[in-house]
């Protein structure tokens, strides 16, 4: 069945360093969504990408959707301690979301 | 404007029992999806309800069933609980547009099966 792979599983960075997580789907996606889940919390919607090659920015966060609509990335510039959490990509296909396993980000002050 | 609400927040059951979880969608939303999130994993899609019918289903056994009411709220029922059913159950609501609906998650119900 359809799978969404996400790497790395864990990332430890020093505050101020950059961070990137990558997402790959086994099939072409209609859209990709990114969520952030704080420890003990629930996934919170960050952004949705729909168009091939689309790039969107939210302050220090940059999201990209691949040309083939099978991969995506999230890049955080100059991480802060408030960025701590698990970042999930979720591929939209046939009306439901297939989530990756997430990348858990820890930031050392 | 209330967001997605779920009840109860926590639940402890024993193997073989049955459980019902409840979800009220965000105001204005008509579609409810349910997800199971095991510890350290991403949410896994269980099923989606729209217009009081199950529209899509993930790879979950028939022990998992649901319902959507005319006010768009929804229930998730799990019969014959297994230890492996212990997880965070998330409800997500959206407005059906046919193209990549953004889903808004509730706080979840943490189910522990002993």
Image (cartoon, coloured by chain):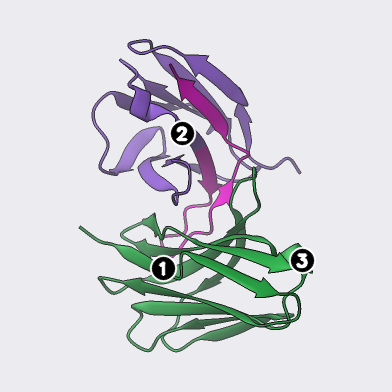
Chain colours: A green, B purple
Q: Nearer the viewer, residue B100 or B19?
A: B19
Task: Tell me if residue B92 comes above or below residue B97 in the rendering.
Answer: above
Q: CA distance from mark 3 to mark 1?
A: 22 Å
Q: Quadrant of the N terminus of chain A?
A: bottom left
Question: Dot 1: within a 10 Å radius of its alpha carbon, few (fewer than 14), some, or many (20 or more) residues?
Answer: many
Q: Is residue B71 visible?
A: no
Q: Residue A11 versus residue B21: which sits nearer the camera?
A: A11
CA gap, disc 2 to disc 1?
A: 21 Å
- Residue B93, magenta (yes or no): yes
Q: Which residues are magenta?
A: B90-114
Q: Is residue B53 visible?
A: yes
Question: Vertically, is B56 above or below A59?
Answer: above
Crowd around label 2: few <14 · some 14–19 · many ≥20 (10 Å): many
The chain under label 3 reads A
The residue under label 1 is A6
The residue shown at (41%, 60%) is A100
On what subunit does the disc labeled 1 rest?
A
Specify the label residue B87 is tagged with. Answer: 2
């Amino acid at each position: 069945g359809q799978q969404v792979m996400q790497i790395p599983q864990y990332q430890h960075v020093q505050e101020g360093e950059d961070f990137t997580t990558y997402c790959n789907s086994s099939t072409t996606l209609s859209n990709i969504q990114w969520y952030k889940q704080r420890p003990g919390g629930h996934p919170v919607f960050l952004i949705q990408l729909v168009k091939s090659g689309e790039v969107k920015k939210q302050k220090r966060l940059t999201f990209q959707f691949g040309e083939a609509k099978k991969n995506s990335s999230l890049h955080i510039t100059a991480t802060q301690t408030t960025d701590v959490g698990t970042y999930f990509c979720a591929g939209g296909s046939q009306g439901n979301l297939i989530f990756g396993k997430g990348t858990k980000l820890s930031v050392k002050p | 404007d209330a967001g997605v609400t779920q009840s109860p927040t926590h639940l402890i059951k024993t193997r073989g029992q049955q459980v019902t979880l409840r979800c009220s969608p965000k105001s204005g939303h008509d579609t409810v999806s349910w997800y199971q999130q095991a510890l350290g994993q991403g949410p896994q899609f269980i099923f989606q309800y729209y217009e009081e019918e199950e529209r899509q289903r993930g790879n979950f056994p028939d022990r998992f069933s649901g319902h959507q009411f005319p006010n768009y709220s929804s229930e998730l029922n799990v019969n014959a609980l297994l230890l492996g059913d212990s997880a965070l159950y998330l409800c997500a609501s959206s407005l059906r547009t046919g193209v990549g609906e953004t889903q808004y998650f509730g706080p979840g119900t943490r189910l522990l099966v002993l």
